[in-house]
Image (cartoon, rainbow, N blue to C red):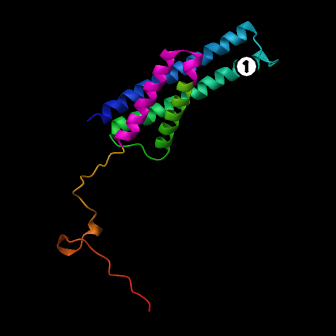
């Protein structure tokens, strides 16, 4: 019931976050370039370009995670393989960023990171629920007439 809306919300949040991260790092690169800032003697041009490239790469990472969440919402199936690994890594990234943002940025950023972390974990956990009713048993576990198959006792050696 709640799985699809959570997947849609996660997809939208990750797409918005991807744009925000990319734009913020691009802006920081422009500021470093115009101010000719340097950190420990590094070339300002290198710092500017690396900030922009890092923002684009990180933004693409979050956009890819958002694409996985969008596919989960459209298909209404749990993520598998690389998509699952991407969502788990996004959850870990948000948990770590949440830990850092409390002291560096403030509680508002921390709250956002924790909410996104909780949404990703909720997405992963709701699709891990058992899809099959408990009363159904695998076909190979029942013998003829519906009685459970038991294995013969193991032979004993004298």
**Residue sitting at x 28%, y 68%:** 141
Relative to 30, does residue 62 appear above or below in the rendering? below
Name, please, the residue furthest toward the top.
Answer: 35
Relative to 145, does residue 37 appear above or below in the rendering? above
Residue 94 horizontal/vertical position (percent): 51, 29
Apparent side of residue 80 relative to residue 55 in the rendered image (left or right): left
Quadrant for the N terminus in the image: top left
Name, please, the residue furthest toward the front.
Answer: 158
State the predominant SS element of the stretch in magenta.
Answer: helix
Queried whether the magenta region covers residue 101, the answer comes back as yes
Q: Which residue is mark 1?
A: 47
**Residue sitting at x 80%, y 18%:** 40
Apparent side of residue 87 relative to residue 72 in the rendered image (left or right): right
Residue 139 horizontal/vertical position (percent): 26, 66
**Residue sitting at x 53%, y 15%:** 106
Q: How many marks are shown on the rendered structure? A: 1
Residue 109 horizontal/vertical position (percent): 50, 18
Name, please, the residue furthest toward the right.
Answer: 41
Front residue of 145 and 103: 103
Quadrant for the C terminus in the image: bottom left
**Residue sitting at x 38%, y 82%:** 154
Name, please, the residue furthest toward the bottom.
Answer: 158
Front residue of 151 and 84: 151
Quarter assignment of residue 25: top right
Q: Which residues are magenta?
A: 100-127
């Amino acid at each position: 019931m709640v799985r699809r809306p959570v997947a849609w919300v996660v997809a939208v949040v990750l797409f918005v976050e991807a744009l925000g991260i990319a734009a913020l790092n691009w802006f920081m690169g422009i500021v470093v370039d115009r101010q000719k800032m340097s950190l420990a003697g590094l070339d300002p041009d290198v710092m500017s370009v690396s900030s922009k490239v890092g923002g684009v790469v990180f933004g693409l990472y979050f956009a890819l995670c958002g694409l996985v969440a969008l596919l989960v919402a459209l298909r209404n199936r749990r993520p598998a393989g690389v998509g699952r690994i991407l969502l788990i890594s996004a959850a870990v990234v948000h948990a770590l960023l949440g830990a850092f943002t409390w002291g560096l940025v403030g509680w508002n950023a921390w709250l956002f990171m924790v909410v996104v972390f909780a949404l990703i974990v909720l997405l992963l956990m709701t699709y891990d629920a058992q899809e099959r009713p408990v009363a159904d048993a695998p076909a190979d576990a029942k013998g003829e007439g519906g009685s459970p198959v038991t294995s013969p006792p193991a032979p004993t050696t004298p």
